[in-house]
Amino acid sequence: MQFHQVRYFLALARTLNFTRAAEQCNVTQPALTKAVHKLEQELGGALIHRERHLTQLTELGKMILPTLEKIFTAAEAVRLQARGYQKKTIAPLKIGLVPSVSAALITELLLELA
């Protein structure tokens, strides 16, 4: 299962329209269709029921949608955390204190920074 396949399926599940889902994902409609088809093959069943002017989620599609949404959200959170760490907006902070400095004073200062 590829991350982009999940993203495309989620867009398609939201819009129920291949063209609009492809536009949201900045890909061509055939590329989106191919990726969703590969995901369906991997999962062993149709996720989308396609008719001329009617696109609906199948029972399998409805069943896996909440799980794929959670996976996608978690993966995006990890990506943002990693990006923040790489940009040094998120990094460990180590503070050394001499015994004569009260930890209570430093705690108040650190809380103001947070």
Image: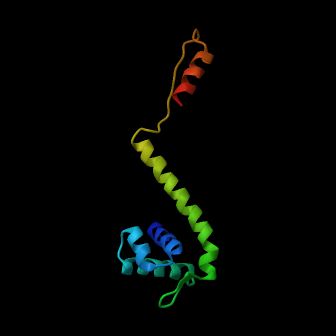
Give left or right: position of 7 versus 58.
Answer: left
At x 38% / y 71%, what residue is drawn? 23
Relative to 49, say whether 93 is above or below: above
> Closer to the camera, 14 or 97?
14
Relative to 24, say whether 84 is above or below: above
At x 50% / y 74%, what residue is drawn? 15
Residue 33 placement: quadrant: bottom left
Residue 1 x %, y %? 50, 71
Q: Residue at the front extreme?
A: 53
Relative to 85, say whether 44 is above or below: below
Q: Residue at the top extreme?
A: 100
Which quadrant: the C terminus?
A: top right
Coloration mode:
rainbow
Total marks shown come to: 0
Give left or right: position of 30 versus 57.
Answer: left
At x 46% / y 53%, what residue is drawn? 79
Residue 69 placement: quadrant: bottom right
Give left or right: position of 19 versus 16.
Answer: left
Residue 58 x %, y %? 60, 82
Residue 89 x %, y %? 43, 38
> Closer to the camera, 16 or 5?
16
Residue 71 x %, y %? 56, 62
Relative to 111, say whether 6 is above or below: below
